[in-house]
Each structure stands twice: as structure tokens, then as C-alpha cells.
Image: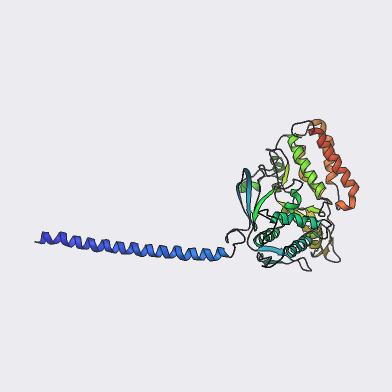
Amino acid sequence: MARGLFPRAWIKKSFFFQARISFVRVKYLFLTWLTVFVGGWVIYVQYSNYTELCRGHECKNAIVYTGGWGDVDGVIRCQVGEVLHYELGEEPEPRREAAVFDKPTRGTSVEKFREMVFNHLKSKLGEQANLASLVTQILSVADGNKDGHVSLPEARSAWALLQLDEVLLGLLLQERGHTPRLMGFCGDLYVTERVPYGPLYGVSLPWPLEAWVPSGARRSMDQWFTPSWPRKAKISMGLLELVEDIFHGNYGSFLMCDLSAGHFGYTDRHDLRLTDPRAIVSEDAFRRTMRALHCEKDEDCLFGADCRTSCDVAQKRCREEVTQPNLAKACRALRDYLLRGTPSELREELERQLYACMALRGSAGQMDMEHSLILNNLKALLWRQISHTKDS
């Protein structure tokens, strides 16, 4: 009898145990479903605020992805979050300002939007004779579906894009082939043509070694894996042509304020590309910024890595005129790059011209003749060496 009861009791306990497991499973399944539902709703609410921008709320300040655009390799850039804004007034104090992407408002006419774009460009570039044609070019870019009309979503998307200075500068220089081509955009997320080779030169070292390598040795190491000399000469010609084009260009003059090798790359045909237009600033914006900058000594009057002015100690304000023109800074950046592997018959003359170029002082506007003479001589010297090669 006892033997008969034991299996029955075991079966009963097993049944209750399985029932309890089933209840726990249902409980966790319900909680999982509830979590997914609530989480999905929160994500929806967060992302619904960005429907015009095609971007994620948690996207960092600048995330770069590679991708494809048809049969062309592209780079996808995402620029979101709070932007560090400098008010160009008496006190250039940084303040955090959330970017506004709800403009133009509903009911804004195309002519009113055109006026908005014109005023925005004027604030960035100053008074320029060709601003109207630039506005027309930007409205053409804004017309994404090319139907001849700029809709409200297209206008808002273009307005969001124009808040990025690097995009605006890229568009200005794209016409002459100095920057990667803008292939598409949605708000402040945009795709540019990928530049296959970059930086211009340099070797990446593990950070523990970086501090122990002497500067002279580091300069030599940076030139280890550069192309053959004729190809370097062609790439260098591209930088000199960039300097020439931004000096009294169609939309004013610009200053190159960071000539780090990381801001430049080149194509399979060894054509130079400026991969980070933030290295360039309009001369008008530069002057306004420096006028508002307090200083005690010349070292305080620095914009970016390479744009310096002098300090008016009596007024405790920075002067507006740069101490070195773009060409001198470009020659300094190219010195080691060009002199390594130079043909022996060319080295002495090239070195002489590079050092004469690096010695230029003052703004290019103050020395138009000398600036143009040195630039043309240097370009002619390089061109004579490569004009008969396949690299030209």
C-alpha cells in the first residue's frame, strides 16, 4: 500500500512543480513583453522629435561611417547634439545652444526662404557680390527630388544642413574639386564622396611611444610611407592651387587655420582633397572674432592651430591682420613632404623657394605681388618636373 502511494505523491508534487514553472515563465514573458512595449514607446517618443533630421537622439557629436552611394564609395557624417557657439560680440564667451531645426515654419514662401538663406550666408561670409548666385546654387541642392520646387521638408532639411559650417565651406570649394563631392543629405546627416588615401602623411604610433620619440625623428618617420616624388609633387600642386583659389575667391577670402596632415587626403589620381573644411574660415568671420578677443600678449591671439595675429597691448585686444599668409603655412606643411626624395638636380632650387615662401609675413592682401610671384614660381618649378610624366 505504501509503495502504491509513493508514485502518486511524486506525480502530484511533479505536477505542482511544473505548474509553478509554467506560471513563472508566463510571468517573465509578460514582464519581457511589457518592457519591450514601454521601451519601444519611449524610443518612439524620443525619435519622433527628429523626423525631419533622419538621425538618432544618441548619435554623438560627429560619427563617421563608410557606405555606398550607387557605385561610388561614400562617407556618412552625423553631426548632432549641442553646438559650441561663439557670440561674435564684445565678449566671445562660449555658450551651449540647441540647434534649431524647425525652420522655415509652415507657410513660409520660397522667396522668404531664399531671403533666410541669403542672410545666413551674409552672416558667415560677409558682404560678397556673388551671394545671390550662391543662394541659387543652394536652393538647387535643396531640391532633392529635382522637381523644380523646394517643399517645406526639403527646405527644413537644407536649413539644418547649412548650420554646419564645414558643409557650407565644402560646397564653396567643391566647384573647383578641392573637397569631396556632397552626394546627398537629410538634415544634418549627409554623405560625401570617400577619399581613398589619407592623411596626407604621418605614422600612427601607440600612445606610450608617442612621448618618447624625439621631434626630429618623428618628422622623418612621418614621411616613410608617402608616394613617389612625382606623385607627391602633383599632390602638392593641389594644395598650392587651393591656396590660390581661396585668396580673393568668388565668395571672399578665406584663411587656412589648421594645416595638419590629417585634414588632407588624395585620390587614386593623386589629386588633393581637403577632407575637413573646418580647417578653413572666412576672413570676415576671422576678423570679427579676433576684434572681440582679449589679450595680454601675442600668444593669446591664436585661432585654430595656425592663424595668429598680434596683441594691441594698450587696448588689450587682438589685431585683425594675420601674421602669416596661407601660402607660408602651406609651404611649411610641404617642406619635409617635398624635400624627401627630391631629384638631386632640383633639390637646391626647391629648398630655396620653399624657405622664401615660408618667410612671407603679413596677410596676402598686403603683399599681392610678392605672394603671387612666389606662388607662381613654385608651381612652375613643380610642373616642369611632372608635366612629362604619366602622373601629370
Q: Position of residue 353 (x, y in %)?
A: 85, 40
- Asked whether 234 or 362 is in front, the reply is 234
Quadrant of the rendering where the C terminus is positioned: top right
Display colour scheme: rainbow
Q: Position of residue 283 (x, y in %)?
A: 81, 57
Task: Report the residue that reaches farthest toward the left.
Answer: 1
- At x 77%, y 55%, the residue is 134
Q: Quadrant of residue 116?
A: bottom right
- Asked whether 237 or 138 is in front, the reply is 138
**Residue 68 falls left or right of residue 238:** left
Whether residue 279 is visible here, answered yes or no, is no
- Asked whether 149 or 188 is in front, the reply is 149
Q: Quadrant of residue 158?
A: bottom right
State whether residue 207 is above or below residue 387.
below
- Asked whether 126 or 306 is in front, the reply is 126
Q: Position of residue 248 (x, y in %)?
A: 84, 52
Quadrant of the rendering where the N terminus is positioned: bottom left
For the image shown, how many numbered marks are present on the structure?
A: 0
Q: Position of residue 214 (x, y in %)?
A: 70, 44
**Residue 55 falls left or right of residue 23:** right
Whether residue 291 is visible here, answered yes or no, is yes
